[in-house]
């Protein structure tokens, strides 16, 4: 089982490799990837350095190119595919079939992964991309139960990667325009959800208010820690009741499910968090490396170390975690 | 406007009681719509109408001269979802709107021609659209977030553009989740939701803590609170190369809205005036930001000189 870790910068990539990641995934400093945030991601030179560093340690670099280009900016995306091939990244993570066609046509040796942004939730969808573009791996959106993940694996030859830890997208990725609705910038096309330039924090007599392009996302009391105004994790009023109507601020953590995911034939575990610090990446990678190694040596005798859980909770959103959709009652 | 725009009734996103649904579609028989999309497009647990009911409604509408299309679910989770989808794509007898790549795979493998690429397929460029066309797609419904400028550029770059449809009226479908937010509102789980959606003909409005209407909860789907309304923008819609206007059903006054669109597309009523008339039939404020490349929530006003 591969451990796939996030790297929003060259220092984070090195930390991930040093801490035991099998693969790191990265993006360029533009809208071609779904974490297009200020101060994040790689220039061409940094990517060149990162690939060299990872390959020297026999680890892989996957380039996320998982937003949807339009007619007006098509070239920027295809140039990035050309760059990925030139710099010999180990795979590109794509969502757009038009780009997959381009990649297969121009760089037949380039390994293709289907991004979670492709919203493929069934073997039928995944097999379509395999038939036409020969994708080798698909990342599943965080919407399926364990039994549903198993059903996908049983019916496709494509390797399956699932999310193991990090921020929880409540909506099916690639099927969410909430950010675009509020700010005009979308995860699909601009690679940005609830982008920082639209965020306002205001200390008011009612408490700390967080706004996204003017929309009040949450208001915090004196004893509350004010979180980032991610649109789907705000408190809203529904029929006179104020609550987290979509989801609490919380992270996904499937450490408890690791043996089951391995048994099911999951090929890779993805850690979310390219927007997090190198220190975070190092810590989370180290814990998951230890867990996967322990699983491999102890098999059925695998137990989660309580210290791992405590450390992961420390870096989780709201210091809490959930099994998300893997756990049916969450739905 | 060279050709009269076609008018389509999009799939009903809400869960209405059986008789209400039957009455609603009976009323569509004599409406001015050219195309009717049927079928469940939000939640697999909704089945006041079964597939045979949809086909029966489709039959009546087809006999009345409407083009009938059966739409598929945009979120496929279970083996039974796939089974139901296969039954639809193989046996419906009507054209299919594919709202997930699983449906595209089935249509392609079965060699079906003339299907519709739905708005949730994430088609943003001519290359992806061309791929779907090569598999048999003959009409494409643009994603709601696509602007007029991007749509125009996309169509211009197509070797052979398909018929293009845009969302012209209704609360915008913005997101889909594994979680049911209506059930959550009632502290229920999706599996035991007690079909609470039946109580909300237009979904449940979500407001900010300042009382501003923001979103609409509709089961696993999240919509805008505002009603996307392109009536005033119709001249620009036609100029962009669009052939079909999609009006989404709403709890009340759908027929009145369709009549306004019909008058506006036939130049019997000035689009700006039609837009103003439509306020009487909207339960929420209008928005059209996406069409103008702005945040979707905005109502972007075009000056009348440009509109005309």
Image: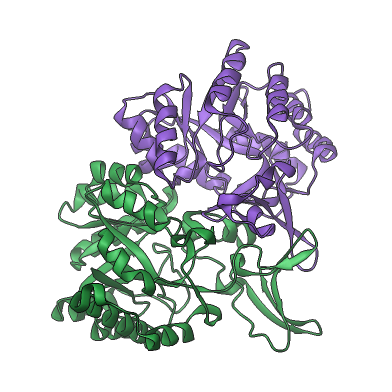
Chain colours: A green, B purple
Which quadrant would the N terminus of chain A be assigned to in this image? bottom left
Residue B240's place in the image compared with A193, above or below, is above
**Residue at 36% across, 50% down:** A96
Q: In the displayed image of the protein, which residue is found farthest to the top?
A: B63
User: Relative to residue B233, is residue A193 drawn left or right?
Assistant: left
Which quadrant would the C terminus of chain A be assigned to in this image? bottom right
Residue A65's place in the image compared with B128, above or below, is below
- Tell me where residue B245 sits by quadrant: top right
Q: Does the image show residue B113?
A: yes
Q: Does the image show residue A26?
A: no
Picture coordinates of residue A316 (x, y %)? 48, 80
Q: B126 or A21, which is in the foreground?
A: A21
- Tell me where residue A54 sits by quadrant: bottom left
User: Relative to residue A299, is residue B83 drawn left or right?
Assistant: right
Numbered label tally: 0
Picture coordinates of residue A119 (x, y %)? 42, 52
User: Relative to residue A85, is residue A314 drawn left or right?
Assistant: right
Q: In the displayed image of the protein, which residue is found farthest to the right?
A: B280
**Residue at 46% across, 84% down:** A315
Q: B104 or A315, which is in the foreground?
A: A315
Residue B256's place in the image compared with A80, above or below, is above
Picture coordinates of residue A128 (x, y %)? 30, 42
**Residue at 24% across, 41% down:** A131
Picture coordinates of residue B283 (x, y %)? 80, 44
């Amino acid at each position: 089982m591969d451990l796939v870790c996030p790297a929003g910068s060259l220092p984070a990539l090195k930390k991930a490799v040093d801490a035991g990641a099998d693969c790191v995934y990265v993006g360029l400093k533009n809208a071609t990837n779904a974490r297009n945030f200020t101060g994040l991601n790689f220039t061409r030179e940094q990517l060149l350095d990162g690939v060299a560093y990872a390959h020297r340690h026999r680890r892989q670099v996957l380039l996320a190119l998982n937003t949807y280009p339009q007619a007006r900016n098509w070239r920027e995306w295809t140039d990035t595919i050309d760059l990925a091939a030139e710099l010999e990244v180990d795979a590109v993570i794509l969502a757009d079939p038009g780009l997959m066609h381009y990649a297969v046509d121009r760089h037949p040796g380039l390994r293709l992964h289907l991004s979670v942004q492709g919203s493929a939730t069934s073997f039928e969808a995944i097999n379509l991309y395999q038939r036409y573009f020969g994708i080798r791996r698909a990342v599943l959106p965080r919407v399926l139960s364990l039994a549903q993940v198993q059903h996908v694996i049983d019916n496709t030859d494509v390797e399956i990667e699932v999310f193991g830890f990090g921020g929880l997208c409540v909506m099916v990725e690639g099927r969410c325009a909430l950010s675009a609705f509020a700010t005009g910038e979308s995860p699909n096309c601009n690679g940005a959800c609830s982008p920082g330039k639209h965020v306002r924090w205001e200390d008011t007599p009612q408490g700390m208010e967080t706004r996204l392009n003017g929309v009040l996302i949450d208001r915090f009391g004196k004893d509350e820690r004010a979180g980032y105004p991610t649109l789907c994790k705000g408190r809203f009023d529904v029929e006179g009741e104020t609550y987290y109507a979509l989801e609490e601020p919380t992270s996904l953590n499937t450490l408890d499910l690791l043996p089951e995911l391995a048994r099911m034939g999951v090929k890779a575990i993805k850690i979310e968090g390219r927007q997090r610090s190198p220190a975070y990446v190092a810590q989370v990678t180290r814990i998951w490396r230890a867990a996967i190694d322990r699983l491999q040596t102890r098999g059925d005798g695998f137990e989660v170390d309580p210290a791992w859980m405590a450390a992961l909770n420390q870096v989780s959103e709201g210091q809490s975690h959930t099994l998300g959709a893997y756990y049916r009652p969450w739905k | 406007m060279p050709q009269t725009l076609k008018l389509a009734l999009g799939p009903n996103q809400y869960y209405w009681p059986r008789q209400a649904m039957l009455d609603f579609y009976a009323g569509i028989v004599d409406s001015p719509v050219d195309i009717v999309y049927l079928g469940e497009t939000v939640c697999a647990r909704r089945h006041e109408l079964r597939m045979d009911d949809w086909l029966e409604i489709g039959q009546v509408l087809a006999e009345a001269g409407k083009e009938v299309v059966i739409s598929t679910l945009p979120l496929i989770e279970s083996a039974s979802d796939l089974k139901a989808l296969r039954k639809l794509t193989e046996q419906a007898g009507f054209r299919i709107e594919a709202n997930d790549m699983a449906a595209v795979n089935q249509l392609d493998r079965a060699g079906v021609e003339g299907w519709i690429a739905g708005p949730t397929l994430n088609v943003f460029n001519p290359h992806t659209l061309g791929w779907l066309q090569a598999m048999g797609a003959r009409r494409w419904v643009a994603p709601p977030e696509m602007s007029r400028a991007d749509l125009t550029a996309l169509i211009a770059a197509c070797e052979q553009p398909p018929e293009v449809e845009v969302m012209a009226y209704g609360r915008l479908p913005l997101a889909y989740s594994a979680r049911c937010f209506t059930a959550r509102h009632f502290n229920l789980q999706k599996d035991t939701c007690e079909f609470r959606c039946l109580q909300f003909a237009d979904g449940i409005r979500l407001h900010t803590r300042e009382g501003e209407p923001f979103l609409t909860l509709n089961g696993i789907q999240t919509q805008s609170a505002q009603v996307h309304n392109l009536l005033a923008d119709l001249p620009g819609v036609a100029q962009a190369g669009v052939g079909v206007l999609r009006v989404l059903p709403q709890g009340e006054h759908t027929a009145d809205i369709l009549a306004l669109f019909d008058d506006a597309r036939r130049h019997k009523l000035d689009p700006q005036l039609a837009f103003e008339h439509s306020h009487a039939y909207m339960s929420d404020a209008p928005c059209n930001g996406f069409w103008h490349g702005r945040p979707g929530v905005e109502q972007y006003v075009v000056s009348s000189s440009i509109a005309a």
